[in-house]
């Protein structure tokens, strides 16, 4: 597997993980912020930080 293919697979895994968790993430953020727009911003920031630190994530299943 070359580096570009490995990067695509990693992006696909991360994207699927985010999509699977998105309803729960948004729900928790809405409960904490009590504001839809702010909740979306919180989740977007969390996803961006997760992407930046994806090499540290443990569960790849």
Image: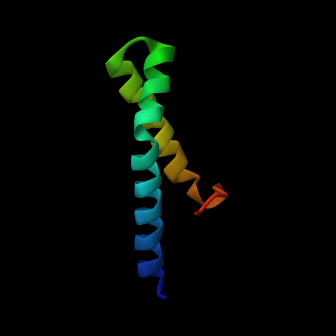
In this view of the protein, which residue sits in the foreground, 19 or 35? Answer: 19
* Image position of 16 with respect to 29: above or below: below
Q: Tell me if 26 is positioned left or right of 52 in this view.
A: left
**Residue 6 coordinates in the image, percent (x, y):** 48, 77
User: In the image, what residue occupies the spot 44% across and 72% down?
Assistant: 9
Q: Tell me if 44 is positioned left or right of 61 in this view.
A: left
Q: How many marks?
A: 0
**Residue 28 coordinates in the image, percent (x, y):** 50, 25
**Residue 53 coordinates in the image, percent (x, y):** 59, 52
**Residue 55 coordinates in the image, percent (x, y):** 61, 61
Which residue of the protein is positioned furthest toward the left in this rendering? 37
User: In the image, what residue occupies the spot 40% across and 35% down?
Assistant: 23
Which residue of the protein is positioned furthest toward the bottom in this rendering? 1
Q: How is the image coloured?
A: rainbow
User: In the image, what residue occupies the spot 34% across and 19% down?
Assistant: 36
* Image position of 2 with respect to 51: above or below: below
């Amino acid at each position: 597997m070359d580096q570009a293919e490995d990067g695509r697979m990693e992006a696909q895994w991360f994207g699927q993980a985010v999509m699977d968790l998105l309803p729960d993430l948004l729900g928790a953020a809405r409960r904490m912020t009590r504001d839809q727009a702010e909740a979306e911003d919180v989740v977007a920031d969390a996803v961006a930080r997760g992407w930046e630190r994806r090499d540290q994530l443990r569960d790849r299943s």
